[in-house]
C-alpha cells in the first residue's frame, strides 16, 4: 500500500514510451512510406503528448525505419535540414540545455545536407535574408564545437563534430567555393583515414 499523504510524482516519458507513440502514430496513418507529411504529423503528436521534446525528423525517421517503414529519403533529409534551421532561427540565444536544436548532434552526412540546404537558401533568398542564413550557420558551427567538447562522446564522434565545425567555417567564409573544397577534403588521405575506416 502507498503511504497516505505522500504525493506521487508524475511519470516522465522515457525513450520506450516515446518510441511506442511514434510507431503507433505511423501505423495509424496507414502509410508504409514516410516523408515530410508523416513526420510532421508525428512531430505534432509528440508535441501534444510530451511538450517541447518532439525530436528531430531524422531521429523519428530512424525509429520508423527500424520498425519497418520505407523512408522517402530526399524528403526526410530536406525536412530535417529545414527543421534544424528553423529551430536555430527561433531560439538563437537559448542556453544549450534548453535549445531544441542542440538536443542531437549531426552526422557528417546530415551536416552535408544541412549545408547544402543553407546554400540553396542563400542563392534563392533576397540579399537582405543572407545575413540571417549566415547566422544560422554560425550557430550550427558553435553547436558542433560544443558537442565536440562533451565528455560523453567517443573519440570518433568528437572528431566528427570537429570536422563538421570546420566544414561550416569554410562555408561561412567562402560559400561559393564550399562544394569544391568539400569534394577535395573528402578525398584527402587524412579524411579517409579518420572517417572511412570506421562506420559513420
Image (spheres, rainbow, N blue to C red):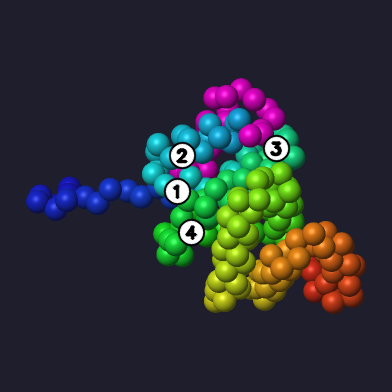
To which residue does mark 3 refer?
Answer: 75
Q: Residues within 10 Å of mark 2 (few under 14, many from 20)?
A: many
Q: Which dot marks residue 53?
A: 1
Q: Is residue 169 above or below residue 124?
A: below
Q: Is residue 130 visible?
A: yes
First reached walking from the N terminus: tag 2 or tag 3: 2
To which residue does mark 2 refer?
Answer: 46
Q: Is residue 59 visible?
A: no
Q: CA distance from mark 2 to mark 3?
A: 20 Å
Give left or right: position of 82 versus 48.
right
Q: Main secondary structure of the magenta part?
A: helix
Give the residue drawn at x 42%, y 47%: 52
First reached walking from the N terminus: tag 2 or tag 1: 2
Labels 2 & 3 near each other (Cβ < 8 A): no
Give left or right: position of 124 versus 94.
right
Magenta segment boundaries in residue numbering:
16-36
In depth, the one of 174 and 187 nearer the eye is 174
Secondary structure category for the residue under label 2: helix
Labels 2 & 1 near each other (Cβ < 8 A): yes
Q: Quadrant of the C terminus?
A: bottom right
First reached walking from the N terminus: tag 1 or tag 4: 1
Give the quadrant of residue 40.
top right
Q: Nearer the viewer, mark 4 or mark 2?
A: 4
First reached walking from the N terminus: tag 4 or tag 2: 2
Give the residue drawn at x 73%, y 63%: 171
Q: Residues within 10 Å of mark 3 (few under 14, many from 20)?
A: some
Q: Nearer the viewer, mark 1 or mark 3?
A: 3
Amino acid at each position: 500500500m502507498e503511504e497516505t499523504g505522500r504525493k506521487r510524482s508524475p511519470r516522465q516519458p522515457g525513450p520506450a514510451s516515446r518510441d511506442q507513440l511514434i510507431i503507433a502514430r505511423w501505423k495509424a496513418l496507414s502509410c508504409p512510406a514516410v516523408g515530410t507529411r508523416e513526420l510532421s504529423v508525428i512531430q505534432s503528436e509528440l508535441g501534444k503528448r510530451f511538450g517541447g521534446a518532439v525530436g528531430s525528423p531524422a531521429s523519428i525517421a530512424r525509429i520508423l525505419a527500424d520498425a519497418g517503414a520505407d523512408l522517402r529519403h530526399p524528403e526526410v533529409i530536406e525536412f530535417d535540414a529545414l527543421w534544424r534551421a528553423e529551430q536555430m532561427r527561433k531560439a538563437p540565444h537559448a542556453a544549450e540545455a534548453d535549445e531544441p536544436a542542440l538536443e542531437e548532434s549531426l552526422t557528417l552526412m546530415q551536416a552535408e545536407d544541412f549545408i547544402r540546404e543553407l546554400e540553396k537558401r542563400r542563392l534563392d533568398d533576397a540579399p537582405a535574408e543572407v545575413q540571417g542564413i549566415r547566422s544560422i550557420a554560425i550557430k550550427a558551427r558553435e553547436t558542433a564545437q560544443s558537442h565536440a567538447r562533451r565528455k560523453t562522446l567517443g573519440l570518433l564522434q568528437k572528431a566528427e563534430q570537429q570536422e563538421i565545425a570546420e566544414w561550416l567555417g569554410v562555408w561561412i567564409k567562402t560559400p561559393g567555393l564550399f562544394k569544391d573544397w568539400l569534394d577535395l577534403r573528402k578525398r584527402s588521405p587524412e579524411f579517409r583515414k579518420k572517417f572511412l575506416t570506421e562506420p559513420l
